[in-house]
Image: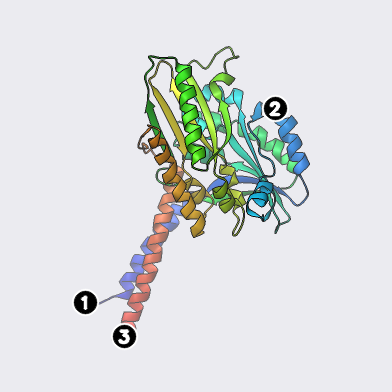
């Protein structure tokens, strides 16, 4: 068989041109996380912002956790962090009508406002997941809901920018896991009192997860929180979220060797549970920890293995409690996501083409 390197190069040119064409129509990596940073000590400014200022924008904080690095040092004997703080926040008024239309939004309600500083760096970072990344993880594609949810962020970002008074940066990523969510259902009888079922389920849930070294880092009763409003959130008979944490896991990811404290925007994990009006079904959902790996490009084997372990262990624990795993439905990808995936494919093609080109050149040399 005669190998014609000229023909091969022409094929490569076509492929490369295709890649350029994809890039030219605006495909780019997605902005996953937004960070505000300063080389000054801004801890008191951020504490003051959380405790006083965010309420004026309609935000509240639920179960804040300051200086988690102190717990790491006490438990494990050392820390590579000067400070690590989780401030789970949500806009109660802004979310109410959105949650009635789209309960999956509770998967990041609250979402974490992270503040951290490594001992090896001068900068203190304050950041959160980008709203479009949150929506993509939750697999929410409705344009109106996405627009309304995005509108909740500019005001809080302006406040953070003022409080930090430093630089703004982003962490970008190429793609999310194919199945970024966990979904479950728990069937129950309504013959008895609903409150009794909820109390018993919550008691069993908390005991089971704590038995496996998980921490209940927060609890937010969304239904109860909206009871005093004119519209009493009547779409649901019950709606609450748990903030789940695992101390050894969090130390492994955020602290110690090859610290990835920047991944703290995902912590603690929010698991939502709701019962629609007159339903016999408790619906449960939570973003997978694989999203941490994808958005933050975590490659360290120890961290990756721990992420995989929890993504397997959490569903198993819920199944042990009687829940049924519900396969995720794959939504239609947005145009931007299609572009990003196309670029990744063409990059792989280009890489293989270069490898083949080298092989052909080597064969041509051997023939001569």
Q: Which of marks 3 and 2 is nearer the N terminus?
A: 2
Q: Nearer the viewer, mark 1 or mark 3?
A: 3
Question: Going from the N terminus, do you reach mark 1 or mark 2 first?
Answer: 1
- Mark yes or no: residue 333 visible: no
Q: Determine which residue is flagged by label 1.
A: 1
Q: Quick one: 132 or 134, which is closer to the camera? A: 134
- Nearest the camera: 23 or 303? 303
Residue extending farthest left: 1
Q: Is mark 1 on a helix, strand or loop?
A: loop
Labels 1 & 2 near each other (Cβ < 8 A): no
Please name the residue that numbered disc 3 is placed on.
366
Label disc, if present, on residue 55 of the rendered structure: 2
Cα–Cα span, label 3 and label 2 = 74 Å
The N terminus, quarter of image: bottom left
Q: In the picture shown, does residue 146 fall above or below 93?
A: below
- Residue 135 image offset from top left, x and y in percent: 50, 36
Calculate the distance from the C-alpha at mark 1 to the C-alpha at mark 3.
Answer: 14 Å
């Amino acid at each position: 068989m005669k190998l014609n390197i000229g023909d091969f190069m022409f094929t490569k040119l076509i492929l490369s041109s295709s890649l350029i064409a994809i890039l030219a129509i605006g495909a780019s990596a997605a902005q996953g996380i937004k960070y505000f940073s300063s080389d000054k000590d801004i801890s008191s400014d951020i504490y003051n912002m959380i405790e006083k200022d965010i309420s004026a924008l309609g935000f509240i904080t639920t179960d804040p956790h300051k200086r988690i690095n102190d717990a790491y040092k006490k438990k494990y004997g050392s820390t590579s962090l000067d400070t690590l703080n989780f401030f789970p926040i949500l806009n109660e008024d802004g979310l109410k009508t959105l949650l009635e239309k789209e309960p999956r939004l509770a998967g990041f309600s609250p979402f974490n406002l992270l503040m951290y500083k490594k001992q090896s760096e001068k900068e203190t970072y304050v950041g959160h997941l980008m709203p479009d990344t949150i929506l993509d993880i939750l697999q929410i594609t409705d344009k109106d809901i996405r627009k309304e949810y995005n509108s909740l962020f500019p005001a809080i970002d302006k406040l953070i920018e003022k409080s930090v008074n430093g630089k703004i940066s982003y962490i970008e990523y190429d793609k999310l896991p194919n199945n970024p969510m966990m979904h479950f259902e728990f069937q129950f009888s309504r013959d008895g009192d609903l409150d009794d079922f909820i109390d018993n389920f919550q008691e069993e849930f908390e005991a089971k997860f704590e038995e496996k070294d998980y921490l209940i880092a927060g609890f937010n009763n969304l239904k109860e929180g909206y009871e005093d409003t004119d519209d009493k959130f009547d779409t649901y008979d019950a709606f609450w979220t748990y903030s789940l944490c695992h101390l050894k896991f969090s130390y492994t990811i955020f602290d110690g060797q090859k610290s990835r404290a920047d991944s703290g925007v995902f912590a603690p994990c929010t698991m939502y549970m709701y019962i629609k009006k007159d339903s016999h079904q408790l619906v449960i959902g939570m973003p997978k920890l694989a999203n941490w790996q994808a958005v933050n490009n975590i490659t360290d084997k120890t961290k990756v293995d721990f992420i995989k372990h929890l993504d397997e262990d959490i569903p198993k624990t819920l199944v042990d409690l009687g829940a049924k795993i519900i396969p995720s439905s794959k939504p239609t990808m947005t145009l931007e996501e299609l572009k990003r995936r196309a670029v990744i494919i063409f990059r792989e093609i280009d890489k293989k083409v270069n490898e083949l080109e080298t092989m052909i050149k080597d064969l041509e040399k051997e023939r001569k």
